[in-house]
Amino acid sequence: MNEHQESSENIKYSTLNAAAEPELPQVVKVLLLTCTQEDHHTERKTPLIISAQRGLAGATRLLLDRNVDMDAKDNLGRTALHHAAENGDEAIIRLLIDQGAEKKIRDHDNETPLHIAVKKL
């Protein structure tokens, strides 16, 4: 990856993170609708992973309605479900599972979302 591509990725990621603030729901929607599944930061966090990690149920639902890959992994091998489990976000966990997210995917530490959720107890 060249310097220009890396800079472009960082701008997209930073903008999506900034727009994910609850006070800016319309901005989130616009950004999410223009992002593709391939839009991710060097940490490989897709818009769905960011939404699940930040606890944004509406954005997560919007992305799932667009049929994004809900089992895409970040650089740690974690999916959106792993991140929702880490946060104990029951609403997003249920949403992802109801939409068919794989519950048994293991991350680079060989942990499933359930392992992560149990460690949080």
Image (tube, helix red, strand yellow):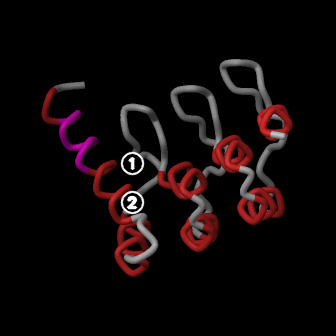
Magenta part, dominant SS = helix
Residue located beneath label 2 in the image = 35
Is residue 10 shown in magenta? yes
**In the image, farthest residue toward the top:** 109
Residue at the image point whose x is 77% and y is 26% from the top: 111
Q: Residue 3 location, x and y as percent? A: 14, 28
Q: Secondary structure at mark 2?
A: loop
Label 2 crowd bin: few (<14), some (14–19), many (20+), radius 10 Å: some
Residue at the image point whose x is 74% and y is 51% from the top: 88
Q: Residue 85 location, x and y as percent? A: 74, 46
Residue at the image point whose x is 35% and y is 65% from the top: 19
Quarter of the view holding residue 58: bottom right
Residue at the image point whose x is 54% and y is 56% from the top: 54
Residue located beneath label 1 in the image = 39
Q: Amino acid at mark 1?
A: Asp
- Is 81 placed left or right of 72 in the picture? right
Q: Residue 41 location, x and y as percent? A: 37, 39
Is residue 77 shown in magenta? no
Q: Is there a contact, CB below 8 Å, between mark 2 and mark 1?
A: yes
**Quadrant showing the N terminus:** top left
User: Of residues 67 and 28, which is closer to you in this image?
Assistant: 28
Magenta segment boundaries in residue numbering: 5-11
Q: How far separated are the C-alphas under marks 2 and 1? A: 6 Å
Q: How many labels sit on residues?
A: 2
- Is 45 placed left or right of 34 in the picture? right
